[in-house]
Image (cartoon, grey):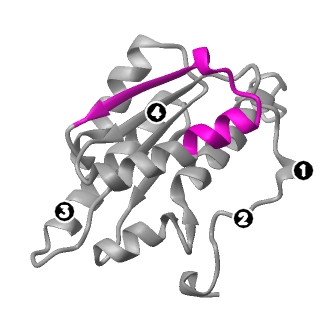
Amino acid sequence: MASTLKNLSVYDNASMPAAADMRFGIVIAAWNAHITHALYQGCLDTLLQHGAREEHIHVIQVPGSFELPTGARLLAGKHKLDAIICLGCVIKGETSHNEYINHAVATGLTNLSIASGQPVIFGVLTPNDEQQALDRAGGKHGNKGVEAAVTAIRMAALKQELSTTKSKIGF
């Protein structure tokens, strides 16, 4: 179903793991702050709703989405975290700059996640225009910050589950 037809932030609340013992990092891009701060609010509210403690949530702000991978790496080096959530917004505009930035950010966050073994969540909006961004930052299509928080909780729980079980294939 096309995202234009539904609220993407609806999820099964009953299937969510408890986040009380989890530690999270949130990296927020300052560029398009009216959008990224709405993403942050949705993200924070969701983490708290599922039991995360405020003192276990570490937040930093970087200048723009391009700096999210470096911000995530710096945050990971400072705190012991179960997942890092990166929130940003790159609006298409008149040039193809968005393609370069979005690709670099996605690659950087993926590489960091794989290299560190730590879940690093891509909560970056990549809309064609500002209205599409607003629709996904608390508007008619929900809040991508909520989705990023849900993903972080689920990935942190998966990491915890797998780190306590013994591998059966020799790894």
Is residue 158 at all visible to an observer of this figure? no
Question: Looking at the image, which is closer to me, 168 or 15?
Answer: 15
Which residue is under mark 1? 14
Of all residues, the one furthest to the right in this rendering is 14
Question: Which kind of residue does numbered mark 3 sit on?
Answer: Tyr
**Front position among marks 3 and 1:** 1
Q: Determine whether 102 is above or below 16 in the image.
A: below
- The residue at 47%/43% (across/down) is 40
Question: Looking at the image, which is closer to me, 157 or 166?
Answer: 157
Question: Looking at the image, which is closer to me, 14 or 106?
Answer: 14
- The residue at 64%/80% (across/down) is 6
Percent across and percent down for residue 149 are 61, 44
Q: Is mark 1 on a helix, strand or loop?
A: helix
Q: Earlier in the sequence, mark 3 or mark 4?
A: 4
The numbered mark at residue 26 is 4
Is residue 144 at all visible to an observer of this figure? yes
Q: Which of marks 1 and 4 is nearer the N terminus?
A: 1
Q: Earlier in the sequence, mark 3 or mark 2?
A: 2
Q: Which of marks 3 and 1 is nearer the N terminus?
A: 1
Which residue is under mark 3? 100
The numbered mark at residue 10 is 2
| Quarter of the rendering containing residue 117 | top right
Question: Which kind of residue does numbered mark 1 sit on?
Answer: Ala
Left or right of 54 on screen, residue 79: left
